[in-house]
Image (tube, rainbow, N blue to C red):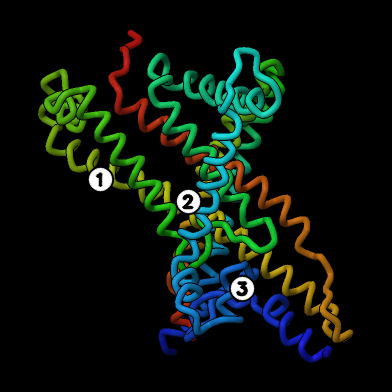
Amino acid sequence: MSHFFFKWLYPVMTLTEGGTEEVAGPPELPNIVTLLSHWFHDNVIVAFLHHWENIFFAFVVGAGLSILAFLSSRRASLIPGGLQNFMEMAVEGLDNFFAGILGKDARHFTPFLGTLFLYIWCMNLLGLIPGFMSPTGGVRGGYNITVSLAISVFLYVQYTGIRRLGLGGYLHHFAGSPTTVIQWVLVPLNLPIHILGEFAKPLSLSLRLFGNITGEDVLIAAFAGLGITALAFLNLPIGLPLHVPFIFLAILTGTIQALVFTLLSTIYFSMMLPHEEHH
Amino acid sequence: MGVPTALAFALPLAVAIAAVGSAFGLGRAVSAAMEAMGRQPEAAGKIQVGMIIGCALIEALTIYALATVFLFMDRVH
């Protein structure tokens, strides 16, 4: 009986090795998908879920946020109460925040940027709930999520540039906006640098978010493993909760990284839009 | 010395050196923010937000070193 209990509980305690089956990666805490793939590793559905683990959890976050939005906006009343009030406060706070940077264009971009912030924030915090993992982290698939977010921001910024500035103005902006003769002469120097900088933006955005969240998850898992090893001599399925302080740190880091991602995207938009000269 | 041994030596060293650099940068950023907050306490909120964002950007460079470690981790056996 106890053998069966430990055999079932074994992956929960010791499934802290990330990476693929061939090479051991950094430690990670078990989540629903890895547990299922440990118990039913011949099932096709479970193998599919394990392969697309990050996208599955990203869907979970997306579904959760969509349900929240639906619940707060049906029977919308002019004097909101409860959930609708809270969501309106959040949306208005985000709108004011973006208005501080983008000015009057903020209202047009708030849906995209606000969704970006809430989505990334919830994804970062999802890893702290036992049984889930942050889709934005994890050495196997986490970079896919962050790079897709960064690419979507990049494409939207370029599209906004072409739409607002026109194709000529867009290329003029990439050449460094030359007005004087000297600036026109420097265009062959400015153009590659600006294009390179433009491509460096999604790279840095994605890498920053991925590295921070993966690092935090690895830290928590390492300390959880340390706590389990500390009480290993008791041969009981308990360990010291040494990772709890790092959970608070992960909450802080997750929030800050979501904020930084969104803020940098807002700044990229404001740099691409025509800015009034304050001379 | 094969590649795995060299990597096992270099990867932690890379993160350590990046951490030193980021410690210097963050120390300067936070100290400037503290000084500015001391000079004008009513602007403390804006200064704090700017400091947090600046710290995240500085930290990102250390995280690039960590991400490189993740990239090369499998080669260390």
Q: Amino acid at mark 1?
A: Leu
**Residue most extreme to the front:** A75
SS for tag 3? loop
Closer to viewer: mark 1 or mark 2: 2
Which residue occupies 70% across, 51% down? A249
Q: Amino acid at mark 3?
A: Pro
Examine the rendered structure and indicate whether residue A76 appears above or below residue B18: above
x then y, percent, for residue B68? 44, 65
Which residue occupies 36% across, 25% down? A270
Examine the rendered structure and indicate whether residue A257 appears above or below residue A58: above
Q: Mark 3 and mark 1 in contact (Cβ < 8 Å)? A: no
Name the chain under label 2: A
Numbered circle sitting on residue A110: none
Q: Nearer the viewer, residue A228 or B76?
A: A228
Residue under label 3, please give it: A27
Q: Amino acid at mark 2?
A: Arg
Crowding around mark 2 (Cα neighbors within 10 Å: few <14, some 14 to 19, many 20+) is many
x then y, percent, for residue A178? 17, 23
**Which of disc 3 and disc 1 is earlier in sequence?**
3
Residue under label 2, please give it: A208
The CA span between labels 1 and 3 is 35 Å
Numbered circle sitting on residue A196: 1
SS for tag 1? helix
The CA span between labels 1 and 2 is 18 Å
